[in-house]
Structures are given as C-alpha cells and as structure tokens.
Amino acid sequence: MVSSLICSVVLGLLAPTRKALVLGLKERGEATAEVLGVATYLSVAAVRAHLTALERLGIVSHTNQRNGPGRPLHIYRLTPAGEMLFPQSYAPLLRAVFDAVADDRECEAKIMRFVEQAQVFELQQHVRAPSVGGRLRELVRAPTFAPFFPEYEQTAERTWCLRFRHCPLKEIASEYAQCCELEQRVVQVALGESATVEVQSRMTDGSPVCAFNVRSGG
C-alpha cells in the first residue's frame, strides 16, 4: 500500500511533458518517438530527449525494430517500475481476500456480490443520464472508475467503444477471471438494460487496454 502510494506521488511529480509521455505509453502499450511526438505536439528530438531521461530513471525502456535499411526504430514501453506509477493498491487486498477463502466457494461468491453491489451503488450516485451515451459520459467521469483511466468514443450510430487504459486489478485478474467478469457486470448495470456490453479486448490477453463494445437498443 505504501509503495503504491509513493509511486502514484512520483507520477504526479513528473514534469507535465514527461507525464504526458508516460500516459501516452500507458495508453498505447508501446510507441515510437514519432507517434508520441504527434500525440504531444512535440518535435521528435524533444520526445527522444525526454524518453532518454525517463529511461535513466528506470520508467521507460526500448527495443530496436528493423524494417529494412537505415536506422532501426526505437519502440518504447513502460518498465515494471513505470507500470507501478499507476494505482495498484486494489490487487494485494483482493489477493489476500481470495487466498483467505480459496476453499470456500460460497464465501468467495458472497464477497464478489458485496463488491459488485458496492460499486454499483456508488456509480448510481453519478450515472443518471436518460440515454446510454449520456450514461457513458458520466461513467468515465465517475470516481469509481478513475483508477482505470477510462475513455470512450462513438464508433457508429448508437454504438461506442469504452476503454480502460489501466487496471488496478491486473496483477491478479489473470488468476481470478471473476475480477474481469465483475467489472463487466458493473458497467452493464450502470449503463442500464437498454445497453449491450461486449468484451473487445482484455489486458490479461496481452492487449494494452480493456475495451468494451457498447450498443444502445433504444
């Protein structure tokens, strides 16, 4: 808990440009200096200089990728220490709970129902719009999902993509699939019966984001 708090403080103390680059890598999983330059409106040289400094801090690393003759591309990504800059405090607590009730399925189910009901109750204080699109807009702004760095975009008429750029449960989600299932159910309940929520991608499967396809039935 203390180490997670310290890491979160470190992220807040980074200079705005470097924080933007770290967030850019978090969102994309990996990227070149050219891609990050477009995203942050910086020159490639400036981006490379900042990334070099972040590498010295142990927050960023890179690999070389050759696509023909010439200089290889530098592909940047966050290191494990860089990932720790984002909220991780939920995972150790849930792991301790799951380990404590590992042989009691009934107790485990009760705990999951309690967590789900608590999340739904909190979300209902913030997600109240009459339309699915309006509820999506309120959901990504709700404190409940703030640690997940949520965002959404409309992809077609009455269709949206909801993404979580970070998962504070990722550390244990690969072992306990019910964590991912719980979050999907919470999103579904928050968006209402007129919405259909389907999984597009999950971080536990190697994707840089958890993404859901959301459709409105009316």
Image: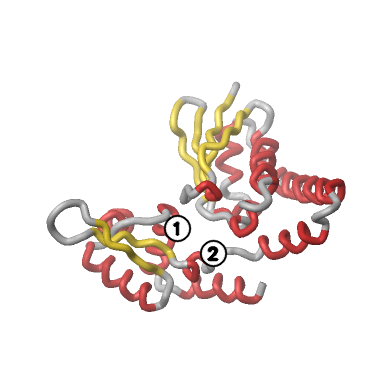
The residue that appears at 67% across and 32% down in the rendered structure is 192
Where is residue 188? Give x, y as percent. Answer: 66, 36
Identity, as a three-letter code, of the amino acid under mark 1: Lys
Left or right, 141 with respect to 123, comes to: left
Where is residue 119? Give x, y as percent. Answer: 73, 49
How far apart marks 2 and 1 lie (CA) works out to 9 Å
Where is residue 38? Give x, y as percent. Answer: 28, 54
Left or right, 170 with respect to 161, comes to: right
Q: Is residue 71 above or below residue 145?
A: below
- The answer to whether mark 2 and mark 1 are in CB contact below 8 A is yes
Where is residue 63? Give x, y as percent. Answer: 32, 63
Give the residue at the far front of this rendering.
Answer: 103
Identity, as a three-letter code, of the amino acid under mark 2: Phe
In terms of image quadrants, where is residue 71? bottom left
The residue that appears at 51% across and 26% down in the rendered structure is 158
Dot 1 corresponds to which residue? 26
In terms of image quadrants, where is residue 51? bottom left
Q: Nearer the viewer, residue 110 or 130?
A: 110
The residue that appears at 67% across and 72% down in the rendered structure is 1
Dot 2 corresponds to which residue? 86
Q: Residues within 10 Å of mark 1 (few under 14, many from 20)?
A: many
Q: Is residue 210 above or below residue 98?
A: above
Q: Name the image quarter holding the C terminus.
A: top right
Left or right, 86 with respect to 106, comes to: left
Dot 2: what SS?
loop
The residue that appears at 65% across and 76% down in the rendered structure is 2
